[in-house]
Amino acid sequence: MSTSVTVQPASLSKSLLSLPRPHDVFNEMDALYHRIAQRAYDIFQSNGWRDGHDLDDWLDAEGELLKAVPIEMTETADKIVVRAEVPGFSPNDLKVDAQASSILIRGKKEQCKEEKKDKGERTYSEISTTEIYRKIELPAQIDREHVSARLDKGVLEMTLPKTTTAKPIEIKAAS
């Protein structure tokens, strides 16, 4: 089953696309950093407090907490199209922040599996969280007000119109 969503420019602030608030982005990055640091420390502990494997522990923690987001970027004379693979995410799970020269894709989804006995007692429960976080630097400035996004079959496609650049004009000085 595929989900398709098209975002209209007038509804950017209440939809998949929004203009970022720097304070919110920094708070989210700080919280993510602390979650990764805590998980890296847990890995360090579980490996018997081995020295010299700090980077390995950090990368293992990052890999467990964040899912990679492969992208494809196409640039034409008037727009940039970015396609990102986000399988399993719904439009409500994703947020894309558009800046003049970059976009930030964030997503978080939680899944819960539960098995119960006849009496309603819980015998098995598993909760998993998948997060994505990808900042993409763009090759040109974009018009943030006319950005659109569409999610279809696990692929988020963002169309980013380029800003029009002022054309130089020649001015002759009067003598």
Image: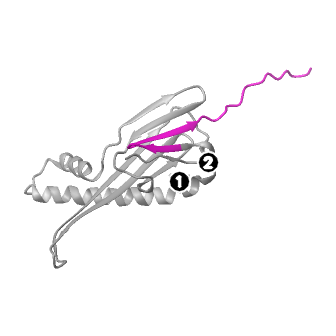
Looking at the picture, how far across and down is residue 76, in whole percent?
55, 26
Q: Quadrant of residue 73?
A: top left
Mark 2–mark 1 contact, CB under 8 Å? no
Q: Residue furthest right?
A: 175
Q: Is residue 166 above or below residue 16?
A: above
Residue 20 numbered tag: 1
Residue 48 horizontal side relative to residue 136, left or right: left
Element type at mark 2: helix
Sequence-wise, the earlier of marks 2 and 1 is 2
Image quadrant for the C terminus? top right
Residue, disc 2: 9
Residue plotted at (26% across, 57% down): 37
Looking at the picture, how far across and down is residue 59, in whole percent?
23, 47
Amino acid marked by disc 1? Pro
Looking at the picture, how far across and down is residue 65, in whole percent?
27, 53
Crowd band around label 1 with a 10 angstrom C-alpha radius: few (<14), some (14–19), many (20+): some
Q: Is residue 69 above or below residue 22?
A: above
Residue 154 is covered by the magenta coloring: yes
Q: Nearer the viewer, residue 113 or 33?
A: 113
Looking at the picture, how far across and down is residue 52, in whole percent?
14, 47
Residue plotted at (43% across, 60% down): 27
Colour mapping used in the image? one colour
Residue 6 horizontal side relative to residue 107, left or right: right
Q: Which residues are magenta?
A: 149-175
Q: Residue furthest front?
A: 118
Q: How many numbered callouts?
A: 2
Residue 32 is covered by the magenta coloring: no
Q: Nearer the viewer, residue 103 or 83?
A: 83
In 3D space, how far apart are the residues under numbered discs 2 and 1 (Cα atoms)? Answer: 15 Å
Q: Nearer the viewer, mark 2 or mark 1?
A: 2
Q: Is residue 88 above or below residue 75?
A: below
Element type at mark 1: loop
